[in-house]
Amino acid sequence: MEDYLKYAKVFKALGDPKRAMIVDMLSCGELCACMILEKFEMSQSTLSHHMKLLCECGLVKGREQGKWTYYSLDTDIVGRIKQFLCGITSDKEKCICKEDAGYCKGCDENE
């Protein structure tokens, strides 16, 4: 359950189109906040809010240099997210649905 909660935060953060676009931009490499701001019609405080959510879920990391913050994807986390998504979308031997396989609490055996 812990993994589901952790990765749900990532997918929730990506549920906003602008945050998804920011992640897309960062897939090309590190960017200064000023470069991200140039692509969107938003205030610096709104961008800060978006970046805070992306950083809190672990997808993005920031580093300060002078008066600007530079953002990049956390490639380790991106790899784990890919593995998680692949895992929950693939048939596997140990799956939640197979824990009580063959038994349906709502079905009558005689039907």
Image (spheres, rainbow, N blue to C red):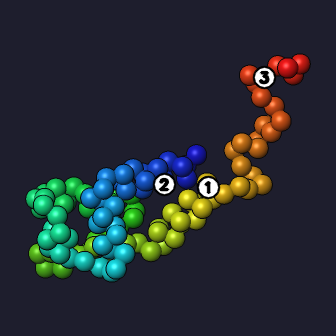
Q: What residue sits 40% from the left and 62% below the top?
A: 58
Q: Which tag, 2 or 3, sits closer to the chain's start?
A: 2
Residue 43 appears at what percent x and percent y? Answer: 10, 59
Residue 9 appears at what percent x and percent y? Answer: 42, 51
Q: Quadrant of the C terminus?
A: top right
Q: Describe residue 37's horizontal placement relative to residue 24 as left or right.
A: left
Q: What residue sits 42% from the left and 56% below the top?
A: 10
Q: Which residue is mark 3?
A: 107
Give the residue type that dot 1 points to.
Answer: Thr
Report the Cα–Cα distance between label 2 and label 1.
Answer: 14 Å
Is label 1 in a helix, a strand or a loop? loop
Mark toward the viewer: 2 or 1:
1
Which of these two is toward me, 14 or 9? Answer: 14
In the picture, the disc for residue 89 is 1
Residue found farthest to the front: 111
Contact between labelled residues 1 and 3, with CB atoms less than 8 Å apart: no
Q: Which residue is mark 2?
A: 7
Q: Which tag, 3 or 1, sits closer to the chain's start?
A: 1
